[in-house]
Image (cartoon, rainbow, N blue to C red):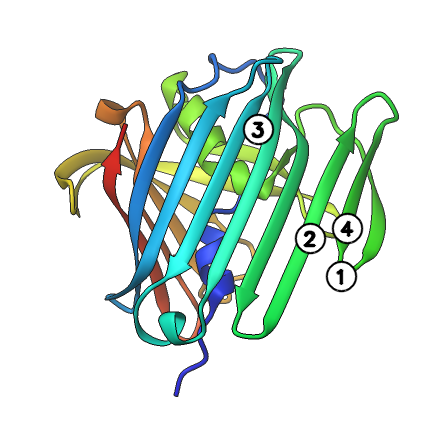
Amino acid sequence: MRTFRPAAIALLLLAVLLPATALAAAPKPYTARYEVLRNGERIGEATIRFAALANGRFDFTSSTRGSGGLAAVLGVSIDERSILRVHDGRLETVAYSYAQKIGWKDKQRSLKVDATGQRITSTDKGQEIALPYQAGVLDRHAVSIALMQDLAAGRQGDLLYTVAERRELGTQRYRTEGTERVQTPMGTLDAIRVDRLRESGDGRSTQFWLSARHAFVPVRMLQKEPEGESIEMRIISVN
């Protein structure tokens, strides 16, 4: 039996930092549902919500539940939440949390950003790690929001993001690859493909397809692992 890889699903919901340039207005609130497939077979559903809060902040959540195959047997659940704000014209993380449950195993981690104190606190497995603050810093869960904003602002080509990982800040690069026709449960959609550019060369790849018709909400996301396994998310509905 193959080992189920929930981390691959989580990576599709992961976030990156926005570049140090002014951004378009934050996306409008939306709720999107996705089917989750492993090697082409449906194993569950994910729900992603982006909402404005009363204090000028934003709430970005994703919830994935296993309902087929090994994911159902193990009762896989993944929940992520980002609280965001606009700071100096850029979106910035205030707090982030991640919770994963597989069978009897639980995993949790979090980030807290203190702009005033110039400090980011990463907590993983009960251990706190201090990271340097950088204006515009976002957790990796918000990658789709970063991409949505950049595409809505008309940016094309290479897109650079600073990412707050568990133990360090890093830079991730993405590149727009033009418009393609994408098959989804919502029908065939025109969407801009964005590829992550990796330096490791280990064979892992991540791709997003974002639809201008739907305010650049991602309509398909695909991650391929070096050993050939793939995890895919395809949009079911958005409102």
Cα–Cα span, label 1 and label 3: 27 Å
Name the residue beneath numbered marker 4: 123
Looking at the rendered image, the disc whose residue lies closer to the viewer, 3 or 2, is 2
Return the x and y of residue 203 as percentages of the image width and height.
Answer: 44, 66
Cα–Cα span, label 1 and label 4: 7 Å
Q: Residue at x 41, y 27 (%)?
A: 148
Q: Residue 109 got which mark?
A: 2
Q: Is residue 88 left or right of residue 48?
A: right
Return the x and y of residue 217 as percentages of the image width and height.
Answer: 33, 31
> Dots 4 and 2: beta carbons under 8 Å?
yes
Name the amino acid type tagged 4: Thr
- Residue at the outermost bottom position: 1
Q: Nearer the viewer, residue 30 or 91?
A: 30
Secondary structure of the residue carrying numbered label 1: loop
Name the amino acid type tagged 2: Arg
| Mark before the other along the chain sequence, 4 or 2 | 2
| Mark before the other along the chain sequence, 3 or 2 | 3
In the picture shown, does residue 12 fall above or below 230?
above
Cα–Cα span, label 2 and label 1: 7 Å
Name the amino acid type tagged 1: Lys
Name the residue beneath numbered marker 3: 18
> Dots 2 and 1: beta carbons under 8 Å?
yes
Looking at the rendered image, the disc whose residue lies closer to the viewer, 4 or 3, is 4
